[in-house]
Amino acid sequence: VMPILEQCYNLMDFEAVARKVMKKTAWAYYSSGADDEITMRENHSAYHKIWFRPNILVDVEKIDFSTKMLGTKVDIPFYVTATALGKLGHHEGEVILTRGAKKHNVIQMIPTLASCSFDEIMDAAEPGQVQWLQLYVNKDRDITKRIVEHAEKRGCKGLFITVDAPQLGRREKDMRSKFDDVGSNVQNTSGDNVDRSQGAARAISSFIDPSLSWKDIPWFLSITKMPIILKGVQRVEDVLRAVEAGVHGVVLSNHGGRQLDFARSGIEVLAEVMPALRERGWEKKIEVFVDGGVRRATDIIKALCLGATGVGIGRPFLYAMSAYGLPGVDRAMQLLKDEMEMNMRLIGASTIEELNPTMVDTRGLSMH
Ligand code: FNR
């Protein structure tokens, strides 16, 4: 029997339920990582290498963990990251995440490959609710330009260009499940016949341009006023180059371990990126986000101590949505808020501004 929602006490509990109740093909698509899934597992376990150095005797009666991301005030420093094919898990698809994000005043990043159309997701938002767009760059730049201009016109507040997926990774669980139902509305504008033998992900991604390069960044900056963020940066050199290229942010991410296996975790990369930015006095020039394996408020706090503006969370909300619909997403977000309040208190910080690198012990990370 399916556990009742009130018996989910943390984000991992939703995964266990989803695994039991989801269609096999959907579970395979959501849960899979690339190759041996070493990076996928490392993403969460990397957080276990960081320990806290709490401050005592700080007044923590009132806790405020609201913050700003790309100029938008949010209740808590996470956003719902872009994950394709929401209708595999729930018949209503991504709009469920839109409603959950509204309720908790967090931002949703809309995937290029959403099951709902972009406009359906924008229309599901309440007035004033902020959304971002994740962009897979099409070989046909006119199509890309139209998507970007339309997103800006509809009021999107950030353009996250995915840079870790010139080719979709091999996710063997997904390939084995012989995916046969792409969902309704996927924007595969290439017109190619899709090859379903390679799994869901590869079937829908043949339009992505593998020739995308640093040379294209000025063009993106010229076609939109939205802030541009590179999603999937994995080394300090590329963060510095992103600053020089004039983009507004980076997401230190390995795509949830779904692309290059043996990519390092985002949190590990963050620990090397922030000192390099501070050394140059560049830490205010760019907003640094991190995603992958964030499952606990303590994970969020660790990333913020190390200098991240915020973190993205993917699979947990997909699992909560697939198992329980909107009430599941609502509870998952509330659990994170409850964990956040308690752990901010226990670490001795009443606001996000008080979190700093002295509050974490990172000697367990491999950089040392
Ligand atoms: C993703 N991710 C992703 N990223 C992206 O830029 N475009 C996309 O279409 C997708 N699609 C997608 C589908 C599914 C099922 C997953 C699990 C992930 C990657 C996503 O934005 C993010 O980087 C990771 O999901 C973060 O890791 P966690 O929180 O899932 O561990």
Image (cartoon, rainbow, N blue to C red):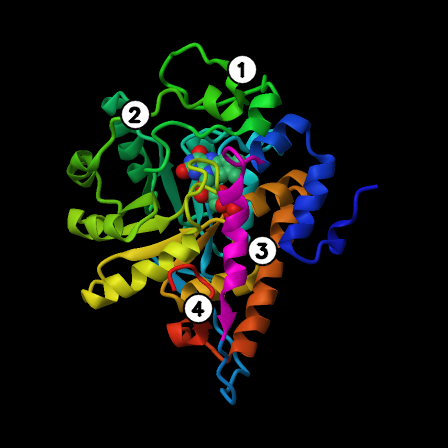
Label 1 sits on what residue type? Ser
Q: Quadrant of the N terminus?
A: top right
Judging by the rendered image, the residue that carries numbered circle 1 is 197
Q: Secondary structure at mark 3?
A: helix
Q: Residues within 10 Å of mark 1 (few under 14, many from 20)?
A: some
Which region of the structure is painted magenta?
Answer: 32-52
Give whichever of discs 1 and 2 has the lower sequence position. Answer: 1
Question: In this rendering, would 257 be left or right of 252?
Answer: right
Judging by the rendered image, the residue that carries numbered circle 3 is 333
Give whichever of discs 3 and 4 has the lower sequence position. Answer: 3
CA distance separating discs 4 and 2:
39 Å
Judging by the rendered image, the residue that carries numbered circle 4 is 363
- Where residue 245 sits: x, y (%)? 17, 46
Q: Secondary structure at mark 2?
A: loop
Give whichever of discs 4 and 1 has the lower sequence position. Answer: 1
Judging by the rendered image, the residue that carries numbered circle 2 is 209
